[in-house]
Image: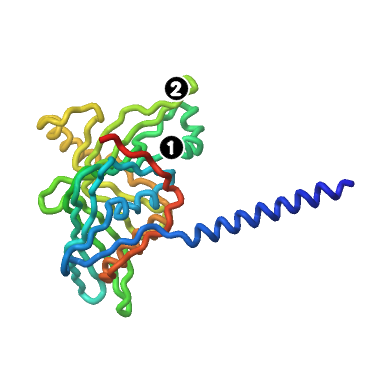
Amino acid sequence: MLMQPLRILTCRSCLLALLVSCAGRALAGLTGPTLQFDYGEGQPLSNPLGHFMYFVPLISPEQVAVLTNAGNTQCARVVAFHCHTNGTSFRTVCEFNFVGEGVQRSLFDHTFIVKRRERELLAGKPLLHQLNAISVQGGGSGSVEIDGTLSNGQPTIAEIRLRFNSHGHPSPVSVNLQDIVLRNGAYYYENEIVARVNALTFRQKAGPPKMEVTLASVKRADAGNGRWQNFVGGLKGAAANFLLPPLNITTNGEQTMMAFGLALAQARPTFTFPFAERLTNGPEIAP
């Protein structure tokens, strides 16, 4: 009589394993969006901004919700290609434009980091400068800079930099950073700052994967947008680059950025992102 429940449990376990296996195979067959490039030859090909920025949920260790405003027309175009080599190393620069109107915002869920670092919070130690959002407002000009080496004619990517402030245009990209604290049994977000981002840098090296963030200005979220506030923000930005440590990213995200850089360095016409498992659907931003 004791064997019947065991058989039922075994069958249920087999069914669960089968479902997990099928789900894994289904996810393995999924991909992210495909970018198209013409490198300034002929009419520039436009990619929805959400496709170009799809790397954000790929590099994030946390879940990410992507929000856009109704009627958003933002898109990205690669408009020029330059490559220089001495036979052993190379640098490729692909210029891009963000065009169109609207805002795209990637919001980061801190549920898992709060659980992982609960002991620190319980001990009264705040989690400083946690990335809350990455936003792209309107248009701008930038470039993807790729450095690498050549061995038997085969390129290997060492570093990729995404710059968002080319040709004298201010960067349309900003990040929101907040401190997370535990007080009287409740979690609070405090000291929110908004920082304009000039560049994101990814390096292929030993150790945990990181993303370096170069800031143009840092302001409190409740600060104004006048000349004095922007001037002070610019001064704070120079100092903040020394205070803001590189951000942790996923191994898959780092590998994706290196593959993205390789595709551009080889002037491929397309690049397909892998599927971002941490991406969740977000609502529209009110106009």
Q: Residue furthest top?
A: 184
Q: Are marks 1 and 2 in contact (CB under 8 Å)?
A: no
Rendered residue at 18%/48% (across/down): 139
**Residue at position x 32%, y 54% in the image:** 51
Going by the image, does 52 lie left or right of 15? Answer: left
From the top left corner, tell me how far across and down residue 89 is, in percent.
25, 71
Visual colour scheme = rainbow
Q: Secondary structure at mark 2?
A: strand
Q: Which mark is residue 183?
A: 2
- Nearest the viewer among 277 and 90 is 277
Task: Count the numbered circles shown.
Answer: 2
In front of the other: label 1 or label 2? Answer: 1
Which mark is on residue 286?
none
Question: Is 82 situated above or below 275?
Answer: below
| Image location (x, y in percent) of residue 33 | 36, 58
Q: Which residue is mark 1?
A: 110
Q: Position of residue 287 (x, y in %)?
A: 25, 35
Q: Could you classify mark 1 by the number of other residues whose Cα lies within 10 Å: few (under 14), some (14-19), or many (20 or more)?
A: some
Is residue 231 depicted above or below 145 in this figure? Answer: above
Q: Earlier in the sequence, mark 1 or mark 2?
A: 1
Is 3 left, or right, of 117 in this rendering?
A: right
User: Few, some or many C-alpha atoms within 10 Å of disc 2 (few <14, some 14-19, many ≥20)?
Assistant: few
Is residue 93 at all visible to an observer of this figure?
yes
- Between the C-alphas of marks 1 and 2, the distance is 17 Å
Q: Could you tell me the amino acid type at mark 2?
A: Arg
Where, by quadrant of the figure, is residue 254 drawn? bottom left
Query: What is the secondary structure assignment of the residue under circle 1?
Result: loop
**Position of residue 11 measured from the top left corner of the image (x, y, whole percent):** 74, 53
Does residue 242 show up?
A: no
Observer-nearest residue: 181 or 111?
A: 111
